Image: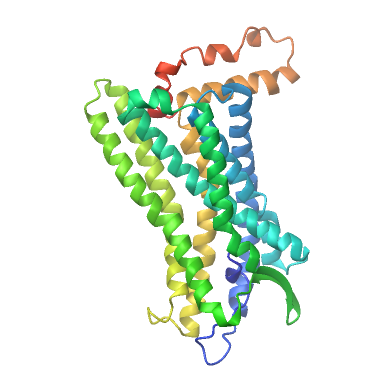
Amino acid sequence: MDSETTTPFYYPDFEEPCQKLDVKLIASQLLPPLYSLVFIFGFVGNALVFLVLIRCKKLKSMTDIYLLNLAISDLLFIITLPFWAHYAADQWIFGDGLCKALTGFYHMGFFGGVFFIILLTIDRYLAIVHAVFALKARTVTFGILTSVITWVVAGLASLPATIFTKSQKEGMQHTCSPHYPLDQFSTWKNFQALKMNILGLVLPLLIMIICYSGIIKTLLRCRNEKKKHKAVRLIFVIMIVYFLFWAPYNIVVFLSTFQVFFGLNNCDSSKRLDRAMQITETFGMTHCCINPVIYAFVGEKFRRYLSAFFRKYIVRRFCKHCPIFHGETFDRVSSTYTRSTGEQDISTGL
């Protein structure tokens, strides 16, 4: 959580402290309801994806492993939102331990989500461009191994924010915000901004451009026109939606960090950047609500899994003797899956 968006902050570049009470007031009115909506829709959507993958698909492929971890990343990110909503409305009342833990969860959820999007992109690239090699490489075991490594990397990327964020009393209120060593303040702040932009924007952009260029070239030679158009459509949605939601926030973070370089080191500009950060960060957060749609519900196959899940675990509890539900099994839904056609899931959006 970028606590600078919700709490007054002192900028060393200003001769006098920049009072941001109006920024705090807007945040206290705007952010709690927005965070609450994101929490509700994001939790329900990702929880459904999690349950369907576990109960229905049984994690049969590397793609399933990555989708499951993407849902976990989003859930890890989402469970922190009620606390930030209360913080935006009032002050931090949850102590230093939760301040550090939730900051860690927030950043691990963010970086984990980015990294698993990258892995899904590479997974699609292997399945479509190197289909023969993919039959050996795209295994459940390899998916689990790379997922563990990815979580370790996400944890390391989240470590500085977790260490330097703490709760303390500032004036009349308790805050939960980053406190870098005074003699290294600029260094750590610049490092955090560059890390966010490189890992959250530049790296996935480069990988997506490289992978999807190869994917599109391969699909243009694909004889199955229906399959080709579905794959291109899904790839386009994945690319555009992620950068549409998170690129504005990354840009604002970069501008806010390097205010002096861009001539924005004055109080009015700083206030405008803080407002922009509030808006873009909240907008970026809503991406965790969209993930279940673009990675799951876009696919016809996944919709059938979801329908079967509701029939077996929800509807039958209320209508046990309804004949329409007799004989409904998940095997019928997944009967077309084989190791040799596993790439079909990738190219048609599950």
Q: Position of residue 198 (x, y in %)?
A: 42, 59
> Left or right: 162 with respect to 90?
left
Residue 190 horizontal/vertical position (percent): 48, 72
Where 103 falls versus 51 (above or below)? below
Where is residue 162 shown, x and y percent of the image?
64, 62
Q: How many marks?
A: 0
Q: Is residue 89 above or below residue 17?
A: above
Q: Give me the residue at 74% from left, 60% from top.
A: 98
Drawn side of residue 263 relative to residue 164, left or right: left
Look at the picture and state if 327 lies above or below 231.
above
- Can the viewer see residue 1? no
Q: Residue furthest left?
A: 221
Query: Farthest residue toward the bottom?
Result: 15
Q: Is residue 136 visible?
A: yes
Q: Nearer the viewer, residue 14 or 210?
A: 210
Residue 232: x and y, percent?
A: 32, 34
Residue at image point 63% right, 7% down: 327
User: In which image quadrant can residue 222 be found?
Assistant: top left
The image quadrant where one finds the N terminus is: bottom right
